[in-house]
Amino acid sequence: MLHPGFTATPLSFERHEVPGAGGEVFSIVIPTWNNLEYLKLCVRSIRENSAFRHQILLHVNDGSDGTAEWAKAEGLAFTRTPQNAGVCFACNAARALVRTPYIVYMNDDMFVLPGWDAALKEEIDLAGDAPFFISATMIEPFPTRSKPVIGGKDFGTTPQSFDEARLKREFASFPKDDWCGATRPPNVMPTWLWDLVGGYSVEFSPGLYSDPDLSAKLYTAGVRYFKGVARSRVYHFVSKSVGRIVPNRGRAQFLEKWGMAPSTFYRFFLRKGEPWEGALRTPELSGALRRRLRADAISRFFS
């Protein structure tokens, strides 16, 4: 069965550019879909809690809530589609407006915390000449089994219930070490590396499992520096758009494309969530990996 996206009307892209102030360090790409109140918090947090000046770029999906008009009033550059184009098309469209050496991808329901960007920039400097993919660490209100996430820290789930003052007092006190397997946003990579692998793969539109797919593309391009930075922290209100989409069959698509399940890639290749010990090594074809790949092959046959 074809995904509903294959029956959609052709996408029509609008671009709104603004002059650069100069001296920006990151180009922060934020896809947004009628989440204006969350977006306002996100943009304000970047402006107030960043150590450096950054270029903020939006892709406005639909924008019937006034997002485009607000962005113009705020002096923000953006691309726009009259319908929801999904994360993959959105990020790739906004790439056309990037003017810094580094691209950060961020969700519109995130609130960055003081020092987030300085910690990422320090890690970029430590990486040296190695191609890298580096993630910040998310704090979320709900308990989670995801190792990279600091879960169960409830500072609100809506802009109205958000306890910003208490979050700013407490966020740095939550224990967390640097971790392996950067994949989810907020993440940063060199702009040249984004172009090398072609950004987000539009066959994963509207976007489920596009994150591990991008990491797999980077891995096949030779990237081994996948690091999660504990000191770079953002609060994530959690999935304020996913529930409104017709999802793609992302796990099956990843399995078909890469010959393994996303969980296999995470565990054996990215070592996602394990303590950071340096650049990744190509895994040995151990008995455990062989068994997982055989199971994935069977799953692929029946998917």
Image (spheres, rainbow, N blue to C red):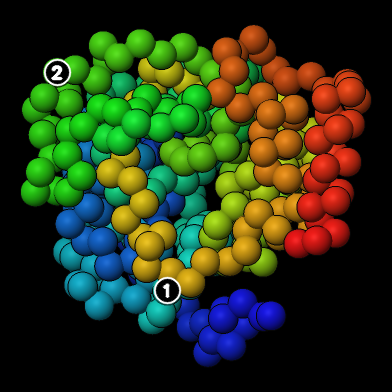
Which badge, 1 or 2, comes first in the chain's sequence?
1
Q: Which amino acid type is marked by label 2?
A: Arg
Locate the N terminus and report the quarter of the image it occupies: bottom right
Q: Residue 46, image x and y in percent?
A: 27, 39
Residue 5: give x, y in percent of width and height: 57, 79
Asked whether residue 285 is in view, the answer is: yes
Q: Is residue 126 left or right of residue 45?
A: right
Q: x, y (%) of residue 292?
A: 81, 35
| Residue 27 visible in the picture | no
Q: Residue at x 89, y 21 (%)?
A: 286
Answer above or below: position of 49 versus 244.
above
Which residue lies under the disc numbered 2?
Answer: 169
Q: Is residue 103 left or right of residue 1?
A: left
Residue at the (21%, 32%) spot, across then down: 154
Mark drawn on residue 230: none
Horizontal arrangement in the rendering, residue 279 relative to residue 113 (left or right): right
Question: Relative to 220, is 19 above or below?
Answer: below
Nearer to us in this view, 261 or 132: 261
Front residue of 134/50: it is: 134
Number of other residues with Cα within 10 Å of mark 1, as a class: few under 14, some 14 to 19, many 20 or more: many
Secondary structure found at label 2? helix
Label 1 to label 2: alpha-carbon separation:
37 Å
Task: Give SS at disc 1.
Answer: loop
**Label 2: how many residues lie within 10 Å, few (<14), some (14-19) or many (20+)?**
few
Return the residue at label 1. 84
Whole-percent x, y for residue 82 in the image = 38, 81
